[in-house]
Image (spheres, rainbow, N blue to C red):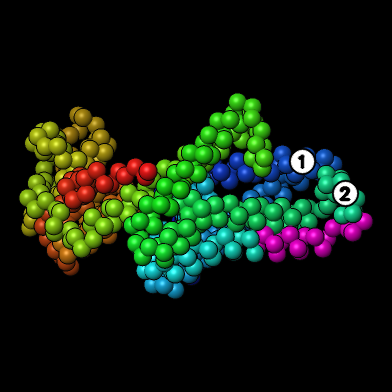
Amino acid sequence: MRSGIRIGRLFGIQIVLDLSWIVIFLLVCWNLTAVFSTWHPDWALGESVSLAVAAAVLFFCSVLAHELAHSLVARSFDVEVREIRLFLFGGVSNIAHEPPSAKAELLIAVVGPLTSIAFGVAMSMIGSFFVPAEVARSGDMLRTIATLGPLTTLLLWLGSINVIVGVFNLIPGFPLDGGRILRALVWTATGDLRKATFWASAVGQIIGWGFVAIGVGMFFGMSVPFFGGGLVSGLWLVFVGWFLASAASASYRGMWIHEALEGIRVVNLMRRAAPAIPEDTSVDDAVRQWFMRSPEHAFPVVDANGTLAGIVCPSDVRRVRDDRWGATRVAEVMTPFERLALATPSEDAQDALAALARRDVEQLPVVREGTRDLVGMLSRRDVARWLELRSGPRLHPRPA
């Protein structure tokens, strides 16, 4: 996974703020400030800004509750949840593997939207108690809103937005929750998870590209019920549609990758004859004798006893001035053993691939269990070659 800000744990699950979340948080605050200033023209700017920040924080807390509901139900079916990540489009629960059954998939998927809708209805009901009856009966929506205090405005906005989020997530396009519900139903009907994923992915791509088409129409002046119109709304819908279509396609490819790597161990994919650099080698010699003579992206570094001491890659070399290469040892610039992501020969290849993605590295040193003894290297290229040999073009299906 990409880097992010780890903010703590809930029920033992790591909560991470993706860096893209900062962008959407600021956009939500800016948009809500404009909305609240329009609803309450007599409010001072500071009051609108303060309420907008509070509303944005509580909204993302409700998104976290949505994802936490998914995660807790997943764990009840013995599905490991690695983390919950809040990012540009809301949140995502990073689970280790597919649910064990269609029933588990259905329950894990449906609990998120139900949580958002229940939270939204509760907030709306509480907020409605603070709206005077004679004001509510006036029939003038903007005038009614203008009479509301900050707390009531906050509650009613949170209520409506959470209901919208819950309903939106029920759209039957994978990987939205509605798409997962569709996959669970097809899985139940066919007994075939692969086929269910195919059809859920196909529907997700159709819906995603449909959003793109609608967004383009809005960009050129078309007004669409519910979505409205305008340049900004159109561009945003195009972006959301493209994301959904891409995610749906990637989800199906992920299913093929899972099948291609099932039962495969790191020892089956790693390269045993991994060239290693002695730790007392100068950076200049490492560049001339290893980096310039090999296509490898990085090299393991071994100590005098031949055990793994670290790993060195081009970014480490670039930290040293050219005129200091001869006087600088590789051991001074390498990533030390204690900070490395490692694999063992008996480790599941799917777990190793997840580690490559999670740490965003190109290769993993493979060491004998419980030691620093280097036995090989596993790279993204090795995994990709295996997938190509095992599955070929099936990894890039085009749903009919």
Q: Is residue 83 above or below residue 55?
A: below
Crowd tier of the residue under label 1, counting other residues whose Cα lies within 10 Å: few below 14, some 14–19, many 20 or above: many
Amino acid type assigned to the residue bearing label 1 in the image: Ser
* Dominant secondary structure, magenta: helix
Residue, x 35% and y 56% (percent of image)? 195
Q: Secondary structure at mark 1?
A: helix
Residue under label 2, please give it: 139
Q: Is residue 176 visible?
A: no
User: x and y percent of residue 277 in the render?
Assistant: 11, 46
Drawn side of residue 207 relative to residue 192, left or right: right
Residue, x 33% and y 57% (percent of image)? 194
Q: Earlier in the sequence, mark 2 or mark 1?
A: 1
Tell me which corner region of the image, top left, top right, bottom left or bottom right, holds residue 192. bottom left
Q: Is residue 45 above or below residue 257?
A: above
User: x and y percent of residue 253 in the render?
Assistant: 32, 49
Q: Is residue 204 above or below residue 83?
A: above
Q: Secondary structure at mark 2?
A: loop
Residue, x 52% and y 47% (percent of image)? 89
Q: Which mark is residue 37?
A: 1
Tell me which corner region of the image, top left, top right, bottom left or bottom right, holds residue 143. top right
Quarter of the picture containing the C terminus is top left
For the magenta stretch, what is the residue range? 119-134
User: x and y percent of residue 178 in the render?
Assistant: 51, 56
Q: Is residue 25 above or below residue 212?
A: below
Drawn side of residue 306 relative to residue 45, left or right: left
Q: CA distance from mark 2 to mark 1?
A: 21 Å
User: x and y percent of residue 217 in the render?
Assistant: 58, 30
